[in-house]
Image (spheres, coloured by chain):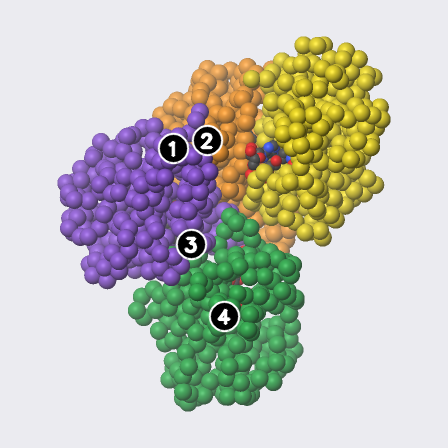
Chain colours: A orange, B purple, C green, D yellow
Amino acid sequence: MRTEVVIGKMKMKNPVMTASGTFGYGNEYAEFFDLSKLGAINVKGISLEPMEGNPSPRICETPCGMINSIGLQNVGLEAFIREKLSYLRKFRTNIVVNVLGNTVEEYIRICERLDEEEIDAIELNVSCPNVKKGGISFGVDEYQLAGLLKDVRRSVKNKTLIVKLSPNVTDIRVFAKVAEEEGSDAISLINTITAMSIDINTRRPKIANLIGGLSGPAIKPIAVRMVWEAFNAVKIPIIGMGGIMNHEDALEFILAGASAVAIGTANFVDPESTMKVVEGIGSYMADNDIMDVNTIIGGLEK
Amino acid sequence: MRTEVVIGKMKMKNPVMTASGTFGYGNEYAEFFDLSKLGAINVKGISLEPMEGNPSPRICETPCGMINSIGLQNVGLEAFIREKLSYLRKFRTNIVVNVLGNTVEEYIRICERLDEEEIDAIELNVSCPNVKKGGISFGVDEYQLAGLLKDVRRSVKNKTLIVKLSPNVTDIRVFAKVAEEEGSDAISLINTITAMSIDINTRRPKIANLIGGLSGPAIKPIAVRMVWEAFNAVKIPIIGMGGIMNHEDALEFILAGASAVAIGTANFVDPESTMKVVEGIGSYMADNDIMDVNTIIGGLEK
Amino acid sequence: MSKLFTAEIIENRPAAKDIHLIKLHLPRHAMNPEPGQFYMLQVGLHNDPLLKRPFCMFDSGAHELAILVKRVGRGTAILTGKLPGSFVDVLGPLGTPYPRVEKEPLIISGGMGMASVYSLIKKYGKGCRVIYGAGSREGLISLDNIREMAGEVAVTTDDGSEGTRGNVMDKIGEYANKGSVVYACGPEIMLMKVSRYCVEHEIECYVSLEQNMACGIGSCVGCVVKTLEGYKRVCKEGPVFRADEIVWD
Amino acid sequence: MSKLFTAEIIENRPAAKDIHLIKLHLPRHAMNPEPGQFYMLQVGLHNDPLLKRPFCMFDSGAHELAILVKRVGRGTAILTGKLPGSFVDVLGPLGTPYPRVEKEPLIISGGMGMASVYSLIKKYGKGCRVIYGAGSREGLISLDNIREMAGEVAVTTDDGSEGTRGNVMDKIGEYANKGSVVYACGPEIMLMKVSRYCVEHEIECYVSLEQNMACGIGSCVGCVVKTLEGYKRVCKEGPVFRADEIVWD
Ligand SMILES: Cc1cc2nc3c(=O)[nH]c(=O)nc-3n(C[C@H](O)[C@H](O)[C@H](O)COP(=O)(O)OP(=O)(O)OC[C@H]3O[C@@H](n4cnc5c(N)ncnc54)[C@H](O)[C@@H]3O)c2cc1C
Ligand SMILES: Cc1cc2nc3c(=O)[nH]c(=O)nc-3n(C[C@H](O)[C@H](O)[C@H](O)COP(=O)(O)OP(=O)(O)OC[C@H]3O[C@@H](n4cnc5c(N)ncnc54)[C@H](O)[C@@H]3O)c2cc1C
Ligand SMILES: Cc1cc2nc3c(=O)[nH]c(=O)nc-3n(C[C@H](O)[C@H](O)[C@H](O)COP(=O)(O)O)c2cc1C
Ligand SMILES: Cc1cc2nc3c(=O)[nH]c(=O)nc-3n(C[C@H](O)[C@H](O)[C@H](O)COP(=O)(O)O)c2cc1C
Ligand code: FES
Ligand code: FES
């Protein structure tokens, strides 16, 4: 039974990875299972300089979902390389680094630096709706996105370049095509959907930043639809995510066209989610006589 | 205690109405409660000619939500006026008629006809994602929307004109402003979000039409955010909807800026939902010493 | 006399493989369902699973309703796991019953179809005949009761573990004739075959259909089936339809 | 030795107004929580309520964990309604305990704060003194036990229905001095006042804080509190913090 999938230059032993920002830098999960079992680990978004993040409350629950406005708190590029990377390298899995910037120059500087490090892929977060300058403009404007990618593509020579698309757009296909045309090796989708929740007793927003990003099972049907639309628009591989809680959900994304899947919010609900998805995909393949997971990518029958 | 709100020329005894397509033509609910208790009844979308709708399965459940692809099945304009309207007129409440067309001309013909009938408001469905020609182009393209509204506004002389916005856009404020500029009396939002679900055992889509519209609690935080954005962009009243299950949810929309709310999917879960929301808003007002519901519209404290 | 009420689960026990018999205590006013009608049950907490699930009236008594639930997904797993003493929100009775026709009733049940026709067999008693098919012996529910109630019972199983090896279509020729009225419930493929047979042989026939449902009361238009007169709602114009009006595809 | 396990509810009874005492039977390996630590409980079915809810270790025994749950919203309503015999998914013990300091322990609890400090009082026994405040007598949980365990107990209630009328701040001057170490848990406003008092009077003080949590293990960075060294995670660097490092706003 073959579960290996290929995303750009990156070979994954199985199609399961973590979603950026939901798995810390890996260490919190190492006590629950062997991280080497994962296809890849995607770490919290990294910026050039450390970021403090937003005030509390940063999260709240919604029906079958949650809103977060972490504000991209992170240790910054140099501290990440110095303090976190060597720990992550101990596991026999791919390391994907999610990066974010406020300007094209920042993205380029981070990418140039990471291109020389011992990582496997760079994922550009151009869509995070949390921080006012956190890249929102790139992710929802096809021309700005194209401009950014043109420059970044030149900086990423050795690693797989993934562009993470924002779902807060009218037509995801347009953005998927821009990513493909500008030479991205893969796209990942979806990032969180902009959302808001109000406490009717205090009449105040449930998160300090007012608006945050919705994730979890609630958004799954929207994410599956976008993966399917993108799959029919471009040829580069897709990493699908949005509300995957178990292997059934993961397989829904694979059938819709995802070559790999990422688990986000589920890590909070059950820290062993990713490993259980890996195992569940194996069982499904065995039960359904599927010899190679690649044969069911986009295998939806209409 | 004053619960009356005003939407254009329409005075509602309370801010609660039904969402189009989720309350049939009213008759199914009359055995559960007195429909005169509602602020308004909004009926299934009406087209010029009867529409057959889509094949089954038309609905499926998703986490905290459902996808539908009814395909706008309806009896058509003339049969509606002949067979359904007089029944609805028996209740002391406002009647809103949701209309849809495939061309500007169709919209105009329906509106001109309804403008002379005993109804209170016309709601333009320009956003239904279900039927290939069902207006999708108007609702996600600001220029087409502006063109449609210019013509329709001239046809609607006696009734309140409401435009129902599609959430499947990058920036809802742009569309809210178009509606305001072209003279709409109010906007309603949100319609369903395009979505998809796959049965991993059969590998087939869970609804025959492949893609449908997501509704229910899952989409509430997205809807609340859009109502808030629209409230800060335009001055015309907003009818808020999307996942309202109870009066707490309804109040969230009101605090975010909705002058009235519509209950959709909740009617399927509990046929008495709308009436319970009316009662719940009353209790909340009493508990919080709110003399006039209008004083808390957009009352979110930042 | 609202059809919406809360009922207590007073019994919940396995009746066959993956199938539970659940008895509910109902408020008086919700009673008197007719064979063929169904109820919608809120199986979980509010919000998720969101929609009520439809189940046939299997049997009913003074203040009691019995349903037969097959575990096929998340909702039915939750329902069959409920402890006696817990409460569920219920809507019903809903839909059209099997109509009374002055002919000799032949009742055909495939697998879980018994959930729908059991009460009909009980109603006609010795006056009706039954063809009862299932995959194997374990899938035959209440067979002893049915033998006791009905005039005549033919049993078929795919694996021959009980009755004749085969399916209900192997028996229909022997049991149905122009003097019969056929009432059938079971898998869609069986209903299609029964319908086609009856139409061809000019036998009056009624089938009980299933569709995904949201509201159960006719308002969402989500549960339609194709008929000669266009789409009809299974929850309102059905679940029992005349076999000759269904367009099978 | 995973911190993730399934536990059976073996007792669930009201302990005060809107407050339940829930006892869980744990697998051996999950034991030995220290005072100040907490557990995350999956209160509903999967998906909704989605996230686990945090509750302090109130008391623990060989294979037992007791928590005190106040009904404030949907999740706690579901949890307090669970029948003995049902199971819940649990993650823990989590977070930092109250540190041992070689000074005279003064334990201050406001309202539900007792959920966190009860086990600490039990640990120090006669060696500690306690200030216990609540809105009124009905809000005082396990008062008799605490009087029996601790060296000295001052009770305050807002309405004077038990002990002194007033709040814990009216007693702190009398009980705290430079030889004390103060451990406090309660409403944020109380913790702020206790902290400010202790910083001002150079008294070592630890407070247990709350924040909305998603993961409970430090990965989401959702539960932060502002400190002199930037944002820190309540679930990982806390919930117990040195009072002088918190930035109150
Ligand atoms: C009028 C009517 C009467 C019924 N009577 C009975 C009965 O007496 N006993 C019984 O065990 N079952 C009966 N069913 C079927 C039962 O409603 C479904 O098995 C149940 O809703 C599945 O819920 P779930 O959450 O377990 O499954 P899901 O996880 O939702 O889905 C599992 C499978 O069940 C199918 N399904 C989901 N929802 C429905 C639905 N509303 N109707 C039909 N199929 C559905 C799905 O397509 C899927 O194949 C009846 C259905 C109808 C329409
Ligand atoms: C470390 C820690 C220990 C705790 N120990 C206890 C305890 O021993 N006993 C006890 O009764 N409660 C304790 N709490 C609070 C308890 O977790 C919340 O009351 C509970 O999560 C509310 O869930 P709900 O679904 O009922 O409320 P919701 O409907 O979700 O919300 C109701 C109210 O509770 C608040 N709330 C929601 N989630 C949380 C959360 N994760 N943390 C804090 N507040 C929240 C909301 O802001 C809101 O005001 C503790 C919280 C933390 C962080
Ligand atoms: C708490 C939290 C933090 C996140 N941080 C990031 C981030 O730093 N960069 C990024 O690209 N996406 C981030 N995301 C988005 C996720 O990677 C993922 O795209 C999204 O949550 C949808 O998947 P899910 O529903 O499985 O969580 C974050 C999500 C959550 C919930
Ligand atoms: C079954 C169904 C049918 C609908 N039909 C229509 C329609 O005909 N016209 C329309 O404008 N909106 C239609 N809608 C959208 C609803 O009016 C509403 O905007 C949406 O469902 C969000 O609200 P809810 O989450 O409360 O259901 C329909 C929704 C559902 C679920
Ligand atoms: S289930 Fe809604 S119309 Fe039948
Ligand atoms: S709850 Fe996730 S970091 Fe604390």
Q: Do labels 1 and 2 share a chain?
A: no
Q: Would residue B133 be found to the left or right of residue C20 on screen?
A: left
Can you give x and y, in whole percent of width and height, for residue D166 in the image?
A: 65, 24
Q: Nearer the viewer, residue D246 or C175?
A: D246
Dot 2 alpha-carbon crowd within 10 angstroms: few under 14, some 14 to 19, many 20 or more: some
Q: What element carries label 2?
A: loop
Going by the numbered disc 3, the residue's amino acid type is: Glu
| Residue behind mark 4 | C31
| Residue behind mark 2 | A203
Q: How far apart are marks 1 and 4 (CA)?
A: 45 Å
Checking the image for residue B272, the label placed there is 3
Disc with the residue nearer the chain's start (1 vs 3): 3
Q: Do labels 4 and 2 share a chain?
A: no
Q: Is mark 3 on a helix, strand or loop?
A: loop
Q: In which quarter of the image is the C terminus of chain B?
A: top left
Res B242 → quadrant: top left
| Residue behind mark 1 | B296
Can you give x and y, in whole percent of width and height, for residue A158 in the image?
A: 55, 24
Q: Is mark 1 on a helix, strand or loop?
A: helix
Checking the image for residue C64, the label placed there is none
Q: Do labels 2 and 3 share a chain?
A: no
Q: Mark 1 lies on which chain?
A: B
Going by the numbered disc 1, the residue's amino acid type is: Ile
In the rendered view, tell whether residue B291 sits above or below residue A116. Answer: below
Q: Which of A98 and D81 is in front in this view?
A: D81
Q: How far apart are marks 1 and 2 (CA)?
A: 9 Å
Can you give x and y, in whole percent of width and height, for residue D202 in the image?
A: 72, 10
Q: Mark 2 lies on which chain?
A: A
Q: Are marks 4 and 3 on the same chain?
A: no
> CB under 8 Å between callouts 1 and 2?
yes
Can you give x and y, in whole percent of width and height, for residue D114 in the image?
A: 71, 31
